[in-house]
Amino acid sequence: MPSVLVIGGDRLGNIRTLLTSMGFTEIIHVTGRKPSDCRLTLPVQTKMILVFTDFINHNLAKHIKVQAKQHQLPVYFCKRSCSAITSSITSLPSSVFANEAEAVTA
């Protein structure tokens, strides 16, 4: 079950539906407004990180980039709109869903 970590924005609205239609079964949302969000630990099942650039501070963005690099996860930075997300994720690597296909066939 591929999951995506969404950082930024108070509400997801239609974005949740868009990500579900792209094949993500679990969507984990962090608003990024709380000071404790800067110490966020990535959930184990995360396959991709989506960061809304107009809703987070620089420290949180830097922290997420460092953790994503350590876990070798793709990070997409975009504005909070369905069209911006679609254009950012159009070249989604197949490795995001690779482990899931192996688990289904096994």
Image (spheres, grey):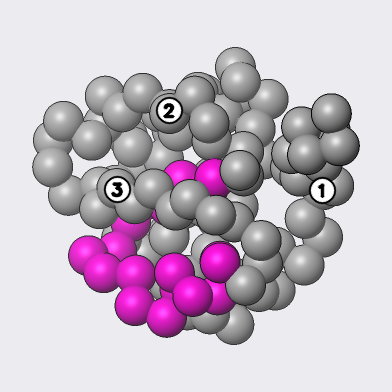
Q: Quadrant of the C terminus?
A: top right
* x then y, percent, for residue 19: 56, 66
Residue appearing at x 26%, y 31% in the figure? 38
Q: Is residue 75 visible?
A: no
- Relative vertical location of residue 57 with respect to residue 9 in this rendering, above or below: above
Residue type pointed to by label 1? Pro
In the rendered view, does 61 fall on the left or right side of 57? right
Q: Residue furthest top?
A: 70
Q: What's the residue type where badge 3 is placed?
A: Val
Is tag 3's residue or tag 1's residue first in the polypeptide sequence?
3
Residue labelled with disc 2: 42
- Along the viewing direction, whichever of 93 and 24 lies nearer the viewer: 24
> At numbered mark 1, what does the secondary structure look like: helix, strand or loop?
loop
Q: Report the magenta residues as a range.
A: 3-20
The residue where tag 3 is placed is 30
Q: Residue 34: give x, y in percent of width and height.
A: 13, 42
Q: Residue 18: x, y in percent?
A: 55, 75
- Let me know if residue 12 is in the magenta part: yes
In this view, the residue in front, 56 or 105, is 105
Dividing the picture into quarters, in which one does residue 59 lie? top left
